[in-house]
Image (spheres, helix red, strand yellow):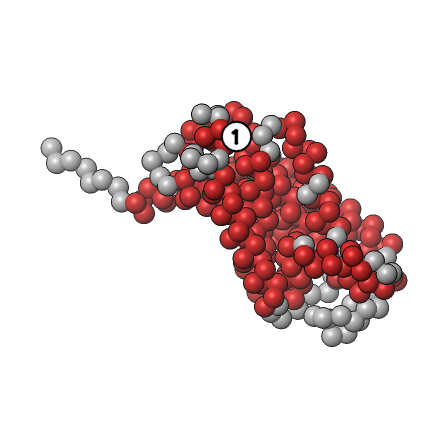
Amino acid sequence: MPSSPVPSLAVHLARALRAVVGRELLKFLRQPSRLASSLVRPLLWFVVFSAGFHNVFGVAIIPPYETYVEYKVYMVPGLLGMIALFNGMQSSLSMVYDREMGVMRLLLTAPLPRGWLLVFKLLASTALSLLQMLVFLLIALAFGVEADLANWLLAIPVMALGATMLAALGLMLSVYIKQLENFAGTMNFVIFPMFFISTALYPLWKVEESGALWLVQIAQLNPFTYVVELIRFAMQGQFNATAFAVVLVGGAVFFGLALRGYDPQRGWTRQRG
């Protein structure tokens, strides 16, 4: 009998992609409460803060806006970034859990370069973030947020890029979080400073006006700020080259550090034998 042809590398990669990304998507779709819980936080901020601070930030004309905008319009890019940030950290938790349960070790021993496997993990996290962000956009429209739908559609690739950078950050952090018990404390030192010291909820000129110049400087060094601004400009039909460069380079650096951390000669696999 003639032997069956050996599958090519492309076939192996396609199977691994389907297995890794499909596993994460199926886990998510089988838990509808997970989608609801992921949207409760940004919706609470959206409803409460847009009402409470409507008259505080609703009169600012700042790039990329060319006219007065309501505060809820200003908030939407920041809350989209929040969804991607929290999901990226959730993916980090999933990686730590898989590592403790032994799933990650089995995955990394698959007959494929581990770089590809980590890329597939990255794509799975990005896909989940993008799905949640799109659902939130539909809810924002239902709440009466004025939008140019053409610009919003064009902003989807930018949203995916921002989600990828934050997923890479979560992937990198999963290298250094050794146990599930340490996850919550570590995340509090990552998520909340990144979110609050950024342009997600208020423009930096408001912070500068209050005299907190050091906060402005930290916000300008915060990669999450550039994710939010990249999405904000894209939703107005504009391109922020600086934010794009920071997000692209930041994502590459975070992923490179994660890849180094999962290297059996350097990372936790060597440390644990």
Residue corresponding to mark 1: 98
Q: Residue 79, position in %: x, y? A: 71, 52
Say if residue 23 shows up in the picture: no
SS label for mark 1 = helix
- The amino acid type, in three-letter code, at marker 1 is Asp
Q: Where is residue 107 in the image (x, y as percent from the top left)?
A: 43, 33
Residue at the image point whose x is 70% and y is 59% from the top: 220
The x and y percentages for residue 67 are: 77, 74
Q: Can the viewer see residue 34?
A: yes
View extreme (left): residue: 1
Q: In this view, does 71 lie to the left or right of 177?
A: right
Please tell me which residue is depicted at 51% across the width and 53% down the height of the picture.
Answer: 252
Q: In this view, does 236 lie above or below 45?
A: below
Query: Residue extending furthest bottom?
Result: 66
Q: In which quarter of the image is the C terminus?
A: top left
> Residue 254 or 124: which is nearer the viewer?
254
Relative to 21, say whether 182 is above or below. above
Q: Nearer the viewer, residue 211 or 157?
A: 211
Residue 99 in the figure: left or right of residue 76: left
Label 1 neighbour load within 10 Å: few <14, some 14-19, many 20+ = some
Q: Quadrant of residue 36?
A: top right
Q: How many marks?
A: 1
Does 218 appear above or below 29? below
Quadrant of the image containing the N terminus: top left
| x, y percent for residue 43 | 74, 48
Quick one: 189 or 46, which is closer to the camera?
A: 189
Picture quadrant of residue 96: top right
Q: Residue at the location (61% across, 39% down)? A: 90
On the image, which quarter does residue 158 sit in? bottom right
Identify which residue is drawn at 65% across, 33% down.
183
